[in-house]
Image: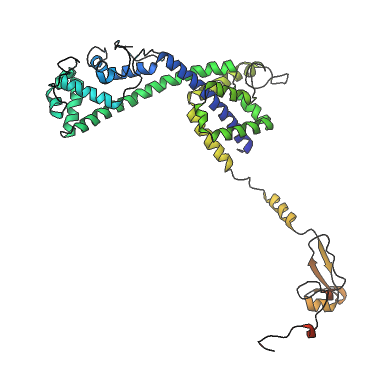
Amino acid sequence: MFGSTILEVVIGIVFVFLLVSIICSAIREMIEAAVKSRAAYLEYGIRELLHDKQGVGLANSFYNHPLIYSLFAGDYPGPLSIGRPSILVRGGKLPSYIPSRNFAMALMDIAARGQETDAISSNAMAPIVSPDSLRMNVRNLRNPAVQRVLLTALDSAQNDLSQVQASLEDWYNSAMERLSGRYKWATQWILFAIGIVLAVGLNVNTITVGEYLYRDDAARAVIVARAEAAARDSTLLRATSTQARAELDSLRLPIGWTEGWGAPRQGTGPMAVGVWNNWFGPITGWLLTALAATLGAPFWFDVLNKITMVRSTKKPVEKRPEELLEDRQRSKPQTLVVYGTGAGAAARDGGVPAEGGAAVRPSLVVGPEFSPPESADALDGCGALIEDETTDEELPAADGGVA
């Protein structure tokens, strides 16, 4: 049965995955800042989009256009990689991001005024960028495939320049979505490599952590409280690697090399030695940690939110029939007193005649200090004790009605 203990263990492991993912993502960003692989992937995508894989034609003119040239420092060096970029390809000084508007306007300007930026193309008498000038000068692109794309956009725009620009922007955005998939794939491999190094270096063994939380109630309660507080604070996703590492260390989990190899069980017990505990256990635990890091911190933050919400709304365990019967018995009054004898009492109060003509009238007495009266005649019709009787003369006169 999926009880609360298992759920709390899962919360603790997810919280550890979240912190590890934050550390791995921070390291990945530092690597990206050094190599700028995003720029290399973007340059490769532009060359593919413009059908200029060698980077000597339209792609070269595109990167040297003032609308694009202003986004980076230096000159366009040419193709950074002829084939698909490697995982850690260097992007140099090229831009890591080009807005779709800049792409569309640069391409239309090249089509209308030519690929070179010189005195003639920059003169006030240069052609105006319009649907007619684009159609007349489309050969300036010197790229049949892209010319066909521009002509298709012109045909569908019905002489509306803004529609031509929107079509080119959509074309660019769809290509960038595919390129983003390739970049994310490369990033996941990098995160996996970082996760392996981090899991082994810090000895973050998922199996060890899970078993420790399952067996230690106090530690499990502490980490669940920390996890629930973190789930309500989205600023945790902006934490630095140092802050995430400090949070991980403060949990006082079996992480690190002070306890030894990091197998699921340590010590002198029967399971302290063997192939699983000395090899497969630690390796499996490290691989689980590394794989979790590839999913990223936002993923584990969302998972943590959902699990903590499930825990807060979890229905109580339904009691067994025998437990319900026991609860009903506890709720009944604890004292039952049978008192009162006499035929008169039985006739007046509905008592049940006992042997010999006597009547026994049962009554429930609530409270330990209540004691039954000596005679049933001391009770009124409601079962209350009569202390002082009121005579008819002492009653007040009626104010109306039937006298």
Within the image, what quadrant is residue 92 found in?
A: top left
Closest to the observer: 168 or 82?
Answer: 168
Closest to the observer: 240 or 180?
Answer: 240
Up/down of 88 relative to 331, above or below? above
| Residue 282 located left or right of residue 61 | right
Residue at image position (47%, 19%) is 28
Instruction: Report the quarter where the C terminus lies.
Output: bottom right
Estimate the x, y position of residue 216 in percent, counting from the top left: 68, 30
Residue at image position (53%, 27%) is 18
| Residue 88 located left or right of residue 304 | left
Question: How was the colour assigned to the protein in this rendering?
Answer: rainbow
Closest to the observer: 113 or 252?
Answer: 113
Residue at image position (24%, 31%) is 166
Return the residue found at the far top.
77
Estimate the x, y position of residue 346 in percent, counting from the top left: 81, 76
Estimate the x, y position of residue 37 in percent, counting from the top left: 39, 16
Within the image, what quadrant is residue 15 found in?
A: top right
